[in-house]
Image (tube, rainbow, N blue to C red):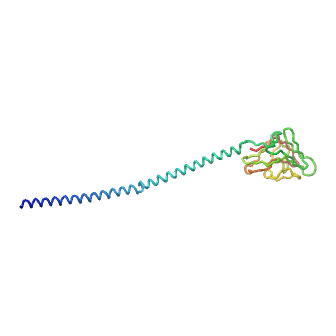
């Protein structure tokens, strides 16, 4: 009887021992799970976590796409500008007058406006002389049409100059047709020759004067000039 009682006590001790091992294992397991959860949470939400990296990657993608759009827009603008410039400047030179050719399709012809001056259209030139008398001995040539200067930077003329004059003698853009009864016209911008000689080139910068103007040349009573060519470029 005593023998069976000892066996029973021994079995109870074994059960209690197994029960203790199970609780310890459970606690250890929970601790390990908490550690893993902490590591996982840090991996996902830390400064270098997956969420942060994902947001950064998304922002970098958006920035790259925006930069690409800006670059494409810039390229498109450059292409359009080139195309527009090529359309505007389809003629490197737009002749107003060229050795006898008045280019009437553009100018509507070249007309004379004068007060006691002399206007002569010769075979290959236009001659403007001061004439005679005590009044204003002026002479002018001017386009009959307004001409669009858009896209052109210079108005140029090739001519002979015999006298520099005192106040006129200039290549000019006009806001009023020069064909007036008193020979007057409003000069918007003009350029006078700086020397006397033959086959001189006068260049008037008109980049700031884009629009429609009458174009021509006028002299005062100290002329004359012989005009061979006049053009826009």
- Looking at the rendered image, the quarter that the N terminus falls into is bottom left
Please identify the residue farthest to the right as the structure is shown: 133
Q: Nearer the viewer, residue 125 or 191?
A: 125
Q: Is residue 172 visible?
A: no
Specify whether 60 is left or right of 34. Answer: right
Residue 223 picture location, percent across and down:
87, 46
Q: Residue at x 76, y 43 (%)?
A: 94
Residue 106 picture location, percent across and down:
79, 44
Please identify the residue farthest to the left as the structure is shown: 1
Residue 182 picture location, percent across and down:
88, 53
Q: Nearer the viewer, residue 71 or 209?
A: 71
- Looking at the rendered image, the quarter that the C terminus falls into is top right
Q: Residue at x 75, y 46 (%)?
A: 154
Q: Residue at x 72, y 47 (%)?
A: 151
Specify whether 123 is left or right of 9. Answer: right
Q: Is residue 145 visible?
A: yes
Q: How many marks?
A: 0
Q: Residue 120 appears in which quarter of the rendering?
A: top right
Specify whether 81 is left or right of 167. Answer: left
Residue 84 picture location, percent across and down:
68, 46
């Amino acid at each position: 009887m005593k023998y069976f009682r000892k066996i029973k006590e021994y079995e109870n001790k074994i059960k209690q021992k197994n029960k203790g091992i199970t609780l310890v294992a459970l606690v250890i397991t929970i601790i390990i799970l908490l550690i893993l959860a902490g590591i996982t949470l840090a991996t996902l939400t830390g400064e270098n976590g997956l969420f942060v990296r994902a947001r950064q990657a998304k922002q970098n993608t958006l920035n790259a796409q925006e930069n690409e759009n800006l670059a494409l827009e810039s390229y498109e603008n450059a292409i359009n500008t080139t195309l527009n410039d090529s359309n505007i400047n389809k003629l490197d030179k737009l002749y107003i007058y060229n050795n006898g050719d008045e280019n009437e399709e553009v100018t509507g012809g070249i007309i004379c406006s004068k007060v006691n001056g002399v206007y002569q259209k010769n075979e290959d030139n236009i001659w403007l002389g001061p004439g005679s008398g005590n009044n204003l001995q002026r002479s002018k040539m001017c386009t009959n049409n307004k001409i669009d200067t858009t896209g052109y930077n210079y108005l140029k003329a090739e001519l002979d100059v015999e006298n520099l004059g005192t106040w006129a003698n200039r290549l000019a853009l006009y806001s009023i047709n020069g064909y007036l009864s008193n020979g007057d016209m409003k000069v918007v911008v003009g350029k006078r020759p700086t020397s006397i000689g033959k086959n001189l080139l006068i260049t008037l910068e008109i980049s700031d004067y884009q629009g429609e103007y009458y174009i021509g040349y006028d002299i005062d009573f100290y002329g004359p000039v012989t005009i061979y060519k006049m053009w826009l470029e």
